[in-house]
Amino acid sequence: MFVDYAVIEVHAGKGGDGIVTFRREKYVPKGGPSGGDGGNGGNIIIQSNNNLHTLLDFRYKKKYQASDGDKGGSSLKDGKDGNDVIIKVPVGTVIKDAESEEPIYDLNTEGQKIILAKGGKGGKGNSKFATPTNQTPRFAEPGIPGEFRKVILELKLIADVGLVGFPNAGKSTLISKISSARPKIADYPFTTLEPNLGIVKYQDYQSFTVADIPGIIEGAHKGKGLGIKFLRHIERTRIILLLIEVTSENFQKDYNTLIGELKSYSQKLLKKKIIVSFSKADLIDKERLKEVSKFRFKGIKEKPFIFSSVSGTGLQELIDHLWQSAREASS
């Protein structure tokens, strides 16, 4: 199951207390202070991992606690530090403060490690407080509590190409034909309820990734339909492929609606390379296909790609163009 949102609580370990002890040795009746320092509390660490693709585990475990540091020992022995807790998340996870919802960290590369909650510092033992005027201090520091945080984990898929279109525009069929992804496909709206990520193998051991985003409807940026929950996944894609059904009654209107939703969600999306295509070419005859091939969208220099995932018409041409565009976008 794909899960892209979770709320968790993390509590770093408390620092161990410093202690009060004195040297007790034969022939040293008045030994000096020998209390050791407490160990530091364990940290809560978040690490990104390319082998993870969902936040599903955080549905079942929502609280993470690192261990406390040990208290100091006699004979100037310091306490042992508490063990860190490492939480692994998929690459592309954004961490936000649960109260303000402001981003704290963005883990967008493999192996990133950040301390989400720092363990408390261990208290000093009485040996650290000895002075010429107070050679037998009878006090020590307590350990400091570890940090507590409640955070939101929000996963944004990282892909070369993001498929964007209305429900039933043919996005799921396309990704199932050009990659090994096997999304649910049916002839009714919102078949895709969660994003699907597919790897498209291209020629000599090369590949690029494609994300199938659930269908967008007018008002999606306000939460209508499946709404804003999935629009965020488009932010990570290098290229946007718009799919408009070739049987639509108004191509320009459909295009304007899709572009309008992207723009309303984030102006940054319009700075990406946007490729426009007509899907389901197998549903019209040759005469209508000729008419459609002459259509041009206002403000778009490139002619739209026409393809059918069912018959294969125009599919290789589209894949070639996506591959070339993905290379240019990553260079």
Image (cartoon, rainbow, N blue to C red):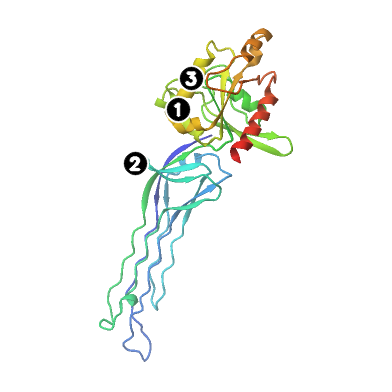
Q: Circle 3 is placed at which residue position?
A: 256
Q: Circle 2 is placed at which residue position?
A: 100
Q: Which is nearer the N-term, disc 3 or disc 2? A: 2
Is 8 left or right of 273, judged from the image as shown? left
Residue 250 - label = none
Badge 3 density bin: few <14, some 14–19, many ≥20, Cα 10 Å = few
Q: Which percent across, then down, holds residue 244?
A: 56, 19
Residue placed at 54% from the left, 46% from the top?
Answer: 109
Callout 1 touching callout 2 (CB < 8 Å): no
Callout 3 touching callout 2 (CB < 8 Å): no
Q: Circle 1 is placed at which residue position?
A: 263
Label 3 and label 2: CA atoms lie apart by 33 Å
Label 1 and label 3: CA atoms lie apart by 10 Å
Q: Which percent across, then down, holds residue 44?
A: 44, 53
- Amino acid type, residue under disc 3 in the picture: Asn
Q: 287 or 36, which lies in front?
A: 287
Q: 205 or 130, which lies in front?
A: 205
Q: Which is nearer the N-term, disc 1 or disc 2? A: 2
**Residue 60 seen in this snapshot:** no
Residue at far bottom of view: 27
Label 1 and label 2: CA atoms lie apart by 24 Å
- Amino acid type, residue under disc 2 in the picture: Ser
Element type where label 2 sits in the image: loop
Badge 2 density bin: few <14, some 14–19, many ≥20, Cα 10 Å = few
Q: Which percent across, then down, holds residue 270?
A: 49, 30
Quarter of the view holding residue 245? top right
Element type where label 3 sits in the image: helix
- Amino acid type, residue under disc 1 in the picture: Lys
Mark nearer the viewer, 3 or 2? 3
Mark nearer the viewer, 1 or 2? 1
Quarter of the picture containing the C terminus is top right
